[in-house]
Image: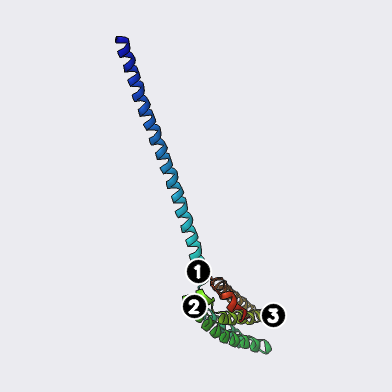
Amino acid sequence: MRKIKNSLSIISILIIMFVFSFAFVVSAKSAQNQEVNQEQNTSTVDQQNQEQNEEQGKEQQGQINAEEHQSAVSNFVQGLLNVADKEQGGIGEQVRTIAQQQNQSASTTIKAMEKIQIRNKVKTFLIGTDYKNIGQLRSEIVKTENQINQLNGLVDKTTSEENKTILQAQIQVLEQEQQKINDFLKVNESKFSLFGWFVKLFNK
């Protein structure tokens, strides 16, 4: 009888140990799964935040402030006019002409950008961006590139080192503004629309 009792006690102890061991393994497995799920969720959230930040970065890159652009061009024009006043002969007049042309171009560029920015979002979603003013901006970009080429040619003809330095600095400013406008175009042209491809055919 004692042997039976002892055997039952041993069996009971083994069963209890098995139950506790099984519960421990299940608990550890559950904790491990929770940790993995938490890491996956964190990774997903981080990825979503990164994508959102990248998208916001593109939007910010594509936004050019009209007042800042006008200020940059105004300083550019004034710098050219100062050079024109100091230079004698044809070079000075050529610089003055480019300054006046860029002043007019800036006014046209700013108006086109403002119309694109205030365009109704629903309208943009359905038929695309403002392709008419997009085309206007591209036209002004080409004009400005020609003016930059002309200025580079005038730099070589300038005898004054001071004027040469001023012209080179103003050319750099104009090139930076050109890059901002190009970024603006890329962002607005890439906006999704349902029928933009069809409307674009009639705006080429």
Measure how far apart labels 2 and 3 are at the Cα level: 44 Å
Q: Which residue is painted at 35% across and 28% down in the image?
A: 20
Q: Is 172 situated left or right of 24 in this image?
A: right
Residue 66: x %, y % from top left: 49, 79
Q: Earlier in the sequence, mark 3 or mark 1?
A: 1
Taking depth in this image into account, of 36 and 9 the one nearest to the observer is 9
Are the residues at dot 2 and dot 3 in contact (C-beta closer than 8 Å)?
A: no
Taking depth in this image into account, of 8 and 21 the one nearest to the observer is 8
Are the residues at dot 2 and dot 1 in contact (C-beta closer than 8 Å)?
A: no
What residue would you read off at disc 2? 123
Label 3, secondary structure: give it.
Answer: helix
Category of crowding for the residue at label 1, using alpha-carbon neighbours closer than 10 angstroms: few (below 14), some (14–19), many (at least 20): some
Category of crowding for the residue at label 3, using alpha-carbon neighbours closer than 10 angstroms: few (below 14), some (14–19), many (at least 20): few
Quadrant for the C terminus, please.
Answer: bottom right
Label 1, secondary structure: give it.
Answer: helix
| Above or below for 99 versus 127 | below
Q: Earlier in the sequence, mark 2 or mark 1?
A: 1
Measure how far apart labels 3 and 1 are at the Cα level: 36 Å
Are the residues at dot 3 and dot 1 in contact (C-beta closer than 8 Å)?
A: no
Measure how far apart labels 2 and 1 are at the Cα level: 19 Å
| Dot 1 amino acid type | Glu
What residue would you read off at disc 1? 59
When asked about the image quadrant of residue 165, the answer is bottom right
Q: Is 25 situated left or right of 191 in this image?
A: left
| Above or below for 52 versus 2 | below
Quadrant for the N terminus, please.
Answer: top left
- Per the rendering, the mark at residue 155 is none
What residue would you read off at disc 3? 153
Q: Earlier in the sequence, mark 2 or mark 3?
A: 2
Residue 202: x %, y % from top left: 61, 81
Residue 56: x %, y % from top left: 48, 65
| Dot 3 amino acid type | Gly
